[in-house]
Image: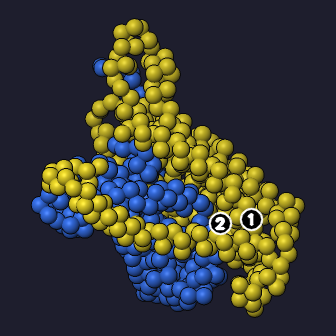
Amino acid sequence: MKRSVSFELFRYAAILLALAVTLIPILWMVSMAFKPVGEWSATGADLTWWPQNPTLSNFRFIFGQSDSSLIVALDRTAMKPILSSLLSASFGTLIAMTAGTAAAYGLSRFGSGQNLPLALTQLRLFPPMAVMIPVMIMWAFLKLTDTWWGLALVYGIVTLPFAFWLMKTFFDDMPREIEEAGLVEGCSRWRVFTRITLPMMRAPLASAALFVFILNWSDYLIALLLTTREWVTVPVYMASLSSSMTGQLYGAKAALGLIAAVPPVIMGIAIQRHLVRGLTFGALKQ
Amino acid sequence: MSVATVSQTAMAGQDTTARAGRDESARLGFRLTLPAQILVLFIAVFPLLMQLYISLTDWSPLSGRNWWMAWESWNSFYNYYDLMQDNRFWGALWRTFVVMIVCVPVEFLLGLGLATLFADDFRGKRVFYSILLMPMMVVPAVAGYMFFMLFQSGGPVNDVLSTLLGTRVAIAWLSDPTLALVAVMIADIWQWTPLMFLILLAGLVGVPQDQVRAATLLGAGPWQRFVTIVIPKMKTIIIIALAIRVIENFKIFDTLYIMTGGGPGVATETISVYIYKLTTQDLIWGYVAAIALAILLVLSVVTIWAMKRMAAAREVQA
């Protein structure tokens, strides 16, 4: 269908406006991350959209180099929080993907675990805030509070529904003929699953794992409740960055925010095709 | 189904082979689903029972008793009675609904508008699409910090307003009770309109084009086609998109808490923020457990309804 010129003009104008609204908050943070201290909180006519004297000092500062213009030095660097985020998000993803893929295959092929779809959907829909009291009590009892492995275990359970549903729709879509051929050849069902099905599903598995990793990496609330000092994650650490001497450490926080924001955005764009499926629990495919 | 096929192919004919296959399937199916079942028990069933128990007591982590000894401060249903009288709770619930009632429709309309613009091909579509999806991938806490910076009184939002209005604008967005709520809503709309856009576009592309063309031939205008064909065809998808955002918006915490911490006063205190403060500052966990259970009960009803909708959508697609 040919569209009129005026429609095309309207379309580009509307999209450009949307792009501007989308990008300005992100660009402001990027710009702030490269601003020296003097430009952090300038107002009015002195407010600069681009750093006048771009610098990497904010990044150096959060990794421990003291900044003469800030007087303060950090009592701990961003290194450990980044490590904590990486470890807890990765192992959380591992737990969710292992349990989720196995359960999805069990349900998809053998009809086992009929209660799981409802149970897991409820798990996903509940506000984490409303189930954290028992978790905090249990974690304190098991000595899991303020550890990356304790956090990873919660992440694994919280994102299990996403791993399960994504993999279930992938298994449901997969043609059965190849598996059946394997069975005729005399393979056991376990062997068919590990030697035929899983290798064929490498790409969907990778997409699902990235999806789950983004969710784990993005968490703030759970880490805020379950970590206190040793193993705080990047968002918790970022929120705690301010000092009584200088107030908000705008640039340093922006630098850290940038570090936190980049991986999920890149991963998200990489798995764009599967986002709809993941977010709607397979109710919709693209 | 596959068991039957296999036994036929093998031409076993006897029950024994088929039964052996079925036993093997059942056993493997059980083992494969076991880890997930254990995790669900561990995080859902057991904690909920524990929560119910604690909600009937005055237990607090400061009480010096282990949680299973909470019965020593048993208070029957007094926590639930308290909840009914708790103005701060109802205020937080009300604010949560206000945010939802503003944000979800705005996100829906903007998302739908953008989706219609992206329904057919044009130059740059893929790049624009990727960029427009970016906000939903930004870590919510970081998005909260972005908007915290934008809404500072000397920040870019006031700067843009000053330029547009020609006078010096220095609104203290985050310390004004009403404006703080507005700022929080703007951040939510910025971050989650892309989700609506993504889902609605997927639905829009799935509308059968022959029907749209037929309507065009019959003389229906674009608006008429949209209302009489496209919208009805997308009904299920629209409901799913709205259900997801309603449920997620109800949990609103990360962006909001980083921007305002629930303040000034309690002006932006939503239900999650209220529970968080009770948990970490007041430490009255028996009462928190009661609030949490009350919310879970109400949400379960919504969940089951949403589940049925999603199951129906899957049936239609299959």
Amino acid type at circle 1 is Ile
Name the quadrant of the C terminus of chain A: top left
Q: Cα distance, mark 2 to mark 1?
A: 8 Å
Residue at left offset 76%, top offset 52%:
B94
**Can you give x and y, in whole percent of width and height, for residue A86 in the image?**
39, 76
**Do the residues indicated by labels 2 and 1 lie within the same chain of the protein?**
no
Name the quadrant of the N terminus of chain A: top left
Q: Nearer the viewer, residue B107 or A274?
A: A274
In the figure, the shade used to draw chain B is yellow
- Residue B9 visible to an observer of this rendering: yes
- Residue A249 visible to an observer of this rendering: no
Of all residues shown, which one is farthest toward the top? Answer: B218
Q: Nearer the viewer, residue B189 or A248?
A: B189
* Mark 1 Cα-neighbour bin, 10 Å: few <14, some 14–19, many ≥20: many
Q: Secondary structure at mark 1?
A: helix
The chain that appears blue in the image is: A
Q: Which mark is residue B291?
A: 1
Residue at left offset 45%, top offset 71%:
A156
Q: Secondary structure at mark 2?
A: helix
Amino acid type at circle 2 is Ala
Chain for disc number 1: B
**Can you give x and y, in whole percent of width and height, for residue B224 in the image?**
49, 16
Q: Is residue B181 above or below residue A59?
A: above
* Mark 2 Cα-neighbour bin, 10 Å: few <14, some 14–19, many ≥20: many
Residue at left offset 64%, top offset 81%:
A137
Residue at left offset 75%, top offset 91%:
B64
Q: Which mark is residue A130?
A: 2
Chain for disc number 2: A
**Can you give x and y, in whole percent of width and height, for residue B258 in the image?**
60, 66
Say if mark 2 contacts mark 1, CB within 8 Å.
yes
